[in-house]
Image (cartoon, rainbow, N blue to C red):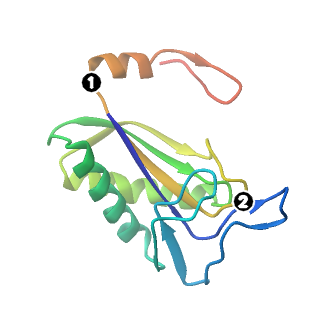
Amino acid sequence: MTRSLGVALTSCTVRTVGKTTFDMADNEMEVGVGIHGEPGRRRVAMMSADAIAEELIYAIVHDLDARAGSEVLLLVNGFGGTPLLELYVMYEAAARQLAKHELKASRRMVGNYVTSLDMAGCSITVTLLDAQVTLLWDAPVHTAALRWRM
C-alpha cells in the first residue's frame, strides 16, 4: 500500500569516513537514491520540481496500481540538506501530479523525518488509504519526533 522514491542533488557525507559517498556535478541529480546515502538508479540532468514530481509520482502510482478516486497519504521527506520551503514546493508539485491521476492527498506530511545527514534532496512516499489505515493514521501520536491529536 506504500511506495517511495527519492532524488538527491548532492551526496551525503559519511562522518566516520569524512567524505561524500559519491560525486556529482552541480547540474546533475541522482534518481532512486537510498535513504542511507546510497547512489541512485541513474544520474540525470537537473530538473525542475514539477518534472521531478511528474517522474516520481508516475512511477509510484503505476507500481501501486492506484485506482482513480482513491485517497492517499502524501509524505515529502527531506534528506537533511534541503530547506523546508523547497520541500513544500515539492509537495505542491507532487499533489498536482496526484490530481492528474485522480488521486487525492487527504493526509500529508512535509519535513525532515528520515535523513541522510546533509544530503540535499527528498523522497516522495504515497500510501493508499482505506478506512482502517486512515483510522490508524488519525490516532493520537505522542512521541519525541511526532505529536498530534486528530
Would you say 28 lies left or right of 36 here?
left
Q: Secondary structure at mark 1?
A: loop
Asked if one can make out residue 127 in the rendered structure from this viewpoint, the answer is no
Q: Gap between marks 2 and 1, in whole Å?
A: 35 Å
Residue under pointer 2: 118
Residue 19, how many percent across, how many down? 79, 68
Q: Secondary structure at mark 2?
A: loop
Could you tell me the amino acid type at mark 1? Asp
Residue under the point 59% across and 52% down: 78
Residue density around tag 2, few if under 14, some if 14–19, many if 20 or more, within 10 Å:
some
In terms of depth relative to the viewer, which is nearer, 80 or 103?
Answer: 80
Q: Is residue 18 above or below residue 102?
A: below
Residue density around tag 1, few if under 14, some if 14–19, many if 20 or more, within 10 Å:
few
Q: Is residue 63 above or below residue 31?
A: above
Residue under the point 58% across and 70% down: 9
Residue 91, how many percent across, how many down? 44, 53
Which comes sooner in the sequence, label 2 or label 1? Answer: 2
Residue under the point 20% across and 36% down: 70
Residue under the point 26% across and 43% down: 64
Would you say 18 lies left or right of 58 here?
right
Asked if one can make out residue 62 in the rendered structure from this viewpoint, the answer is yes
Could you tell me the amino acid type at mark 2? Asp
Quadrant holding the N terminus: top left
Residue 26, how many percent across, how many down? 61, 83
Q: Is residue 57 above or below residue 108?
A: below
Would you say 10 lies left or right of 97 here?
right
Residue 13, how many percent across, how many down? 75, 63
Residue under pointer 1: 130
Would you say 49 lies left or right of 55 here?
right
